[in-house]
């Protein structure tokens, strides 16, 4: 992931709402839809994107009486920061596990390790 992509994820309104709402209490997509006023289709899209980026995880899947599966999600992102310094964009993700990951991009648009 590049620094700009990482910063876009955390500044997207719906993604940020999902990450914040699920940090301490896991929630289903329907709960996020109702509590955070996120359209249900957008909610599912953001959940998939956040899972793909490793920022959200499914912690439980339940079955209803009708046979539908309901997944509960929790954020594993504890803190995120974006810095602009000396021609470099730096995004840092700190996970609930204590691990952190940094993403850099210089002013030429080149990702740095």
Image: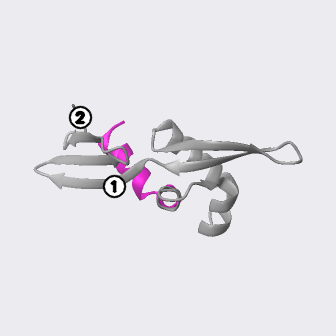
* Segment tinted magenta in the rendering: 1-17
Mark 1: give few (<14), some (14-19) or many (20+) Cα within 10 Å. few
Q: Nearer the viewer, mark 1 or mark 2?
A: 1
Percent position of residue 101, x then y: 29, 40
From this viewpoint, which residue is outermost toward the right? 66
Residue 2 in the magenta stretch? The answer is: yes
Q: For the point 32% across and 54% down, which residue is it?
A: 80
Q: Quadrant of residue 35?
A: bottom right
Screen quadrant of the C terminus: top left
Q: Residue at x 53, y 50 (%)?
A: 74
Q: Which mark is residue 110?
A: 2
Mark closest to the chain's N terminus, 1 or 2 = 1
User: Residue shown at 30%/41% (left/top)?
Assistant: 99
As drawn, 112 above or below 55: above
- The residue to which callout 1 is attached is 79
- Above or below, 19 against 60 in this view is below
Secondary element type, mark 1: strand
Looking at this view, name the residue that lies furthest to the top. Answer: 113
Residue 106, given in percent of the width and then of the height, sits at 19, 41
Q: Position of residue 61 (x, y in %)?
A: 69, 42
């Amino acid at each position: 992931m590049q620094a700009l992509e990482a910063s876009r994820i955390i500044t997207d309104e719906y993604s940020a709402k999902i990450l914040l709402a699920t940090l301490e209490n896991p929630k289903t997509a329907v709960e996020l839809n109702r509590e955070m006023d996120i359209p249900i289709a957008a909610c599912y899209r953001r959940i998939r994107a956040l899972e793909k980026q490793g920022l959200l995880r499914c912690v439980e899947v339940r079955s209803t009486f009708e046979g539908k599966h309901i997944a509960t999600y929790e954020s594993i992102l504890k803190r995120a920061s974006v810095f602009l310094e000396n021609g470099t964009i730096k995004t840092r993700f700190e996970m609930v596990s204590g691990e952190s990951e940094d993403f850099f991009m210089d002013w030429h648009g080149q990702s740095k390790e």
